[in-house]
Every structure is written in C-alpha cells, then in structure tokens.
C-alpha cells in the first residue's frame, strides 16, 4: 500500500463548480498534514495545513479524519486560476522532517 | 529576501556523464532537503542535510548519487554516470530548522534533468 494515496484524476470542472479531493495515508504515526499546489513545471507551494478540527481558508476547506486516516480538500466556486495539480502531503513523527507526497490530482477548471 | 535558488534550471546530459545540481537555501536557513519527481509521479524524499552533515539519506539510491552541504556555498546533489532513468525534476527545499513540523519547508524552482 502506498504511503499517501490520492484520487487519480484528472478532474475537469466548469468555473463555479465545487470539487473535492480525497487522500488516505498509511502511517498511523503521521502527525502533520498539508495540501500543496503544483502548477505545470513549477515547484510545489503550500496551499494550506490540515488541522484535526477542520479548517477553512476562503473557498478552500480541509478536513482530517485520523481514525480513518483520511484527508480531504474542498474547493468551492472554482476559478480558472485553480487549475493545477493538488498534492496531499504528510509528515510523520520520527521521519526526520521529510515530507511524504501523494502522486497528485490534476484539476482543470474550464470557462 | 530571495527564495530558495536552484541552478541550473535545465540540464541535459548524455548517458555516462556527471550531473551537478546546486541549491542555495533561503537566507538564514541551515537545513536543506532534496526531492525527486519522476515523470507522472509524486515527489520522493532523497536526502536531508544540515551544514557539513548528512542527517538522513534514506531516499538516496545506493550508487552514483551523493549530496553535500559545505560550510560555505550551496548544497550540491551529484549524480555520476547518469542513466536515462535519472531524468526527472529535482527539487530542493530549505527550512530554518528545528521545528520538525514539515510546513516550514520552502521549495526552489527545481532542476529538470534530461538524460539522452
């Protein structure tokens, strides 16, 4: 089983749609969770951290379920500029600071 | 405050040649991480270094790959006798160090290595 698994995608949605990304992780020692965004041929950039109580940042909502080892990202009212690959990222206690990335899910928002 | 800098941004090598990838961390950062992203794959951790020390190289291939972060100058990822399978994007990240939270890693623009 892969350490971090994401929806394979790709997702194609019209502007204004709501889109949800799902992610599961296998290491129960994981302690920090993030969503990164990676534009084509660019470096990954932190979109938001994911907290146990769930957290929201504008149109973006992240949820964490530790019991199910499941993370989600919801984008509401999607914009053309949201088109990118979304990476689920996990940091495990004792992992010596290394981040474990999912393969990513490509989102294309169409006009 | 300049971000993480990597050079070259693109590197073409023939099989058997050496590739040297450089990474200058953000000012004030003393911790450097190298990740590799193969085509159509996620980023994979390679090595974590502090000044003059390799802390964790569990993601590095056992042969042909080496990394250093000298007291002065950038961190270097060196690939000897490159093969086509080494073609990938190599990203460097840096952090101030010590927090262990993961979220304080800042990524450079990457070096895209193409082996012909």
Image (cartoon, rainbow, N blue to C red):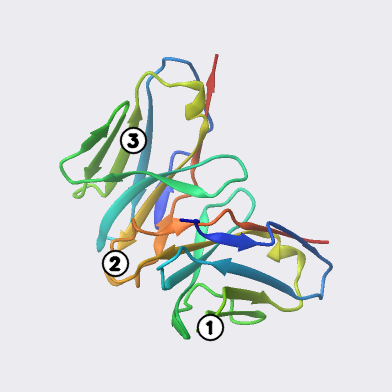
| Marks 3 and 1, how far apart at CA | 40 Å
Both labels 2 and 1 in a single chain: yes
Q: Chain of mark 3?
A: A
Q: Which residue is mark 1?
A: B70
- Residue A63, percent from left and from top: 25, 38
Can the viewer see residue A1 in this picture? Answer: no
Q: CA distance from mark 2 to mark 3?
A: 23 Å
Instruction: Assess disc 2: are there few (<14), some (14-19) or many (≥20) residues with their C-alpha within 10 Å of its C-alpha.
Output: some
* Residue B45 rendering spot, x and y as whole percentages: 48, 65
- Rendered position, B25 above or below B2: below
Residue for badge 2: B100
Chain at numbered mark 1: B
**Where residue A28 appears, x then y in whole percent?**
25, 60
Name the subunit of mark 2: B
**Residue A75 falls in image quadrant:** top left
Element marked by disc 2? loop
Seen from the viewer's position, the closer of residues B95 and A52 is: B95
What residue lies at 30% left-to-right and 43% top-to-bottom?
Answer: A71
Q: CA distance from mark 2 to mark 1?
A: 22 Å
| Relative horizontal placement of residue A55, taking residue A109 as reference (left or right) | left
Front: mark 3 or 1: 1
Labels 2 and 1: the sequence-earlier one? 1
The residue singled out by tag 3 in the image is A73
Judge the density around disc 3: few (<14), some (14-19), many (≥20) Cα neighbours within 10 Å.
many
Q: Is residue A26 above or below residue B58?
A: above
């Amino acid at each position: 089983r892969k350490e971090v698994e994401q929806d394979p995608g790709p997702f194609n949605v019209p502007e204004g749609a709501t889109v949800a990304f799902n992610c599961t992780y296998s290491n129960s020692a994981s302690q920090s969770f993030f969503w990164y965004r990676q534009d084509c041929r660019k470096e990954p950039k932190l979109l938001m951290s994911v907290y146990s109580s769930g957290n929201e940042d504008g149109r973006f909502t992240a949820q964490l379920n530790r019991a199910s080892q499941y993370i989600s990202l919801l984008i509401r009212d999607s914009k053309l500029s949201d088109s990118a690959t979304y990476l689920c990222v996990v940091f495990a206690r004792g992992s010596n600071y290394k981040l474990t990335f999912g393969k990513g899910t490509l989102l294309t928002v169409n006009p | 405050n300049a971000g993480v800098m990597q050079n070259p941004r693109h590197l073409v090598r023939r099989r058997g040649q050496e590739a040297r990838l450089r990474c200058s961390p953000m000012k004030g950062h003393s911790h450097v991480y190298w990740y590799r992203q193969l085509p159509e794959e996620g980023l994979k951790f390679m090595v974590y270094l502090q000044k003059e020390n390799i802390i964790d190289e569990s993601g590095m291939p056992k042969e042909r790959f080496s990394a250093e972060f000298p007291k002065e100058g950038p961190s270097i990822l060196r690939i000897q006798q490159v093969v086509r399978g080494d073609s990938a994007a190599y990203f460097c990240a840096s952090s101030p160090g010590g927090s262990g939270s993961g979220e304080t890693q800042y990524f450079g623009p990457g070096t895209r290595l193409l082996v012909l």
